[in-house]
Image (cartoon, rainbow, N blue to C red):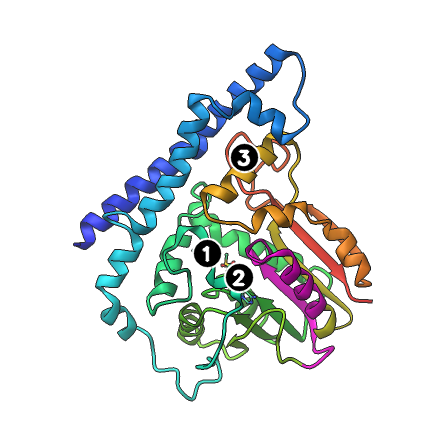
Amino acid sequence: MDDRSFVAAQDVILDMKKHWTTRLYPALKAEYAERAAAVGESPQTRQQVTELLGSTTSYRYFAWMERHLQRMKYSGRYGLVPYHHERAADLRNTLPDMSGESRLELDPDFKNPVYYETVDVHQHPGGVWSEPTAGFVYERGARSTTPMLGARHRDLHGRLTDRAIRDGIPDRMLDMGCGFGKSTRPFYEELRDTQVEAVDLAAPCLELAAADAAATQAENVRFRQMNAYETDYDPESFDVVTSTMLLHEMPPEEIGRTFDECARVLKPGGRMVHLDFYILPDAFAEFIHYGHSQRNNEPFMVPLVEMDVKAELETRGFTNISIEPFQEADGVDVENSPFWRFPWTIIAADRP
Ligand SMILES: C[S@@+](CC[C@H](N)C(=O)[O-])C[C@H]1O[C@@H](n2cnc3c(N)ncnc32)[C@H](O)[C@@H]1O
């Protein structure tokens, strides 16, 4: 496929996603309010919302668009996967030779945890790990994951960075589940005196992350292929541990193990800050989020929101726990957004 057709098709898909976000979602919400008013009481549970809305044409249309726009984006006629596969050799040639580089450490014998290979998360065929262009596909796809943020998507990571260093600049920090380095970059760029370690399971993403760091000549970062809940770092070796959009991609047991690992590698008084999708303010938000989990192939999103994270952290002895909504960009109404948005939430706690 030629570049022009690919770009045009992806632009159309993105515009349709904006339409879905800014028109279909508010229309669905308005219909919900009307139906709730007609029965005289506000639904308290997701099941009640389903009874009101689940078989309406507007919900089916909304749901169909959500599922199939994502499918078209990744694997349609002009999808990200066929486009990048056709160019696999050229794309690989754009990566610098990183052998002998301290910025990248891959493990040729690495074994993924079972949960990771059982589902094509985000409807990305083969996931972000299974073939050499997967990092490029994910990088291109992530540009339109939050269609309303556009170029401001970068702000999201900058905001998390500010939040994570609010109480002091770390000497050493760890970014878990760093992907292709988008969440790690503001840390190593802003904190030149901090040693930033970043781990992920996906070699094709880590390669991109390290190439990016090399391009900016950052010397204070290292990308390593490692499981977030089974790292080889020494106990008490970090001041700060972060993750962005990692927890909702793990089953509950692995989330618990990740909190254990944070407790192990944090210095006493160290802080962990996770940015994920957690606080659902009402039954309608729950209905939408549970549906998204199914339609976008995100099976672990639901167990995360059903988990009592505060209790999990207390059990492990964490203190100063804060679980609060996170404003991903200026002007976003986190309590009652008129447009569709993820339920961004900060989960932060200190190791005593
Ligand atoms: C949604 S992506 C987020 C990437 C990055 N933090 C960002 O904000 O762009 C989630 C990442 O978590 C990684 N991941 C999932 N399970 C993991 C685990 N057990 N250990 C390390 N990384 C993991 C995936 O490979 C993926 O790159």
Residue 33 drawn above or below residue 204: above
The residue indicated by pointer 3 is 288
The verdict on residue 248 being magenta is yes
The residue indicated by pointer 2 is 115
Q: Residue 211, percent across and down?
A: 40, 74
Q: Residue at x 66, y 29 (%)?
A: 45
* C-alpha span from label 2 to label 3: 24 Å
The verdict on residue 320 being magenta is no
Magenta stretch in the rendered image: 234-262
Residue 213 in view: yes
Q: Amino acid at mark 2?
A: Tyr
Count of numbered circles in the view: 3
In the figure, residue 350 lies in which quadrant?
bottom right
* C-alpha span from label 3 to label 1: 21 Å
Q: Amino acid at mark 3?
A: Ile
* C-alpha span from label 1 to label 2: 7 Å
Q: Secondary structure at mark 1?
A: loop
Residue 169 in view: no
Q: Secondary structure at mark 3?
A: helix
In the figure, residue 313 lies in which quadrant?
bottom right
